[in-house]
Image (cartoon, rainbow, N blue to C red):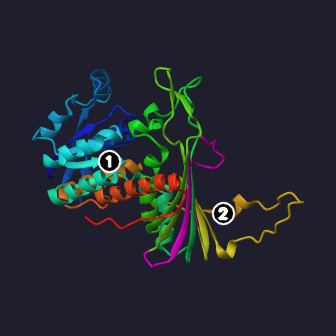
Amino acid sequence: MTTRTLRIAMNGITGRMGYRQHLVRSILPIRDQGGILLPDGTRLQVEPILIGRNADKVADVAARHGVEHWSTDLDGAIDDPSVDVVFDASMTSLRAQTLTKAMKAGKHVYTEKPTAETLDEAIDLARLGASSGITAGVVHDKLYLPGLVKLRRLVDEGFFGRILSLRGEFGYWVFEGEHQEAQRPSWNYRKEDGGGMTTDMFCHWNYVLEGILGAVRTVTATTVTHIPTRWDEQGREYAATADDAAYGIFDVETPSGDPVVAQINSSWAVRVYRDELVEFQIDGTHGSAVAGLRRCVAQQRAHTPKPVWNPDLPVTEPFRDQWLEVPANAELDNGFKLQWEEFLTDVHAGRPHRFDLLSAARGVQLAELGLRSSAEGRRLDVPVIEL
């Protein structure tokens, strides 16, 4: 058996997403399972190199997880000829510079979103990736979640008939930090540091809509800063300059040309009254389904009840009980880990990754248009990006 080891410089690994999802739940399990066994018998192993700005924090993470190599020198890791892949989960404002350096150094890149602060930067990255011959991948984790895998399967099987609409609800209450510690870093709420719900989440919603339904053609959005004052990690009061909620309506075109209306609400100032922190409902002529992170339930046309509106009587229909669980019919691993395995397999094969920097640029574009739509109070077309 042949074994190939890919050395991965993992930047921003002390942050919440970089640490929990990418290191602890993806790369370390791949390492500890002995790598990825490919169909040709090759075993693809990984060797992480942890990168961060705080030496004590990075050294602590490395020691706790048995990682031999770590550094605070990102440029040195990029220039190291033994490094195969550069991964970035640091601040958005630094990402374009990091990815540009890595690709110019001939490194494969895998990155969180958004890939850049502006569409022009995101397009430049996509062009560089396309011309450099490297494999570039962008995290599209939600498409690998069990709930959305099931939802996509229903679409592929024609369960919905003609799809009419999608409704999404995402978010939860993020504490202000005054009396209870906030669950998210303070920079998320400062526009000048790259924060903002629209910038953060519209990149996700673009690939979710593309991956489940089709291309986004128009956007209408309202963005709001519901909580104007928050407290940072040191307990200092600061003005929240970024939006903490975004309410979007999207016109989507399916591959068959059918129009679909999608509505997605995103908020860090909402209390959860649903089964999961994010849920998507698709309604079609032949059936409907609701998917969260893990579960998916569906209701066929033949099993659809016939409720009658009567506000004078209490509801007697057990609506939730009338939906059936959609089975996984397969073992579905952690979504981040699954995409890492797919990306690393593409690196080994020397082929493009299906979720590339152009896909990420479309996400940045949708975020920019969403902010502009809110500022101008109108619906905007989503142009096709050409490299």
What residue sits right under mark 2 in the picture? 323
In percent of the image, x 14 and y 52: which residue is there? 2
Give the structural element (helix, strand or loop) at label 1: loop
Q: Nearer the viewer, residue 150 or 312?
A: 312
Q: What amino acid is found at the position of numbered circle 2 in the picture?
A: Trp
- Does the rendering let one see residue 352? yes
Q: Which residues are magenta?
A: 255-282
Q: Position of residue 241 (x, y in %)?
A: 49, 36
Q: What amino acid is found at the position of numbered circle 1 in the picture?
A: Ala
Residue 31 within the segment the image draws in magenta: no
Snapshot quadrant of residue 95: top left
- Does the rendering let one see residue 295? no
Q: Position of residue 242 (x, y in %)?
A: 48, 40
Q: Are marks 2 and 1 in contact (CB under 8 Å)?
A: no
Q: Position of residue 179 (x, y in %)?
A: 60, 23
From this view, report whether residue 16 is shown above or below residue 207: above
From this view, report whether residue 327 is shown above or below residue 286: above
> In the drawing, what numbered circle is on residue 154?
none
Q: Residues within 10 Å of mark 1 (few under 14, many from 20)?
A: many
Q: CA distance from mark 2 to mark 1?
A: 41 Å
Q: How many marks?
A: 2
Query: Looking at the image, is mark 2 or mark 1 earlier in the sequence?
Result: 1
Q: Position of residue 308 (x, y in %)?
A: 81, 69
Q: Residues within 10 Å of mark 2 (few under 14, many from 20)?
A: some
Q: Quadrant of the C terminus?
A: bottom left
Q: Image check: 372 left or right of 112?
A: right
From this view, report whether residue 82 is shown above or below residue 72: below
Residue lying at the far front of the rendered structure: 376
> In the drawing, what numbered circle is on residue 116?
1
Q: Nearer the viewer, residue 277 or 41?
A: 277
Give the structural element (helix, strand or loop) at label 2: loop
In percent of the image, x 82 and y 59: which residue is there? 315
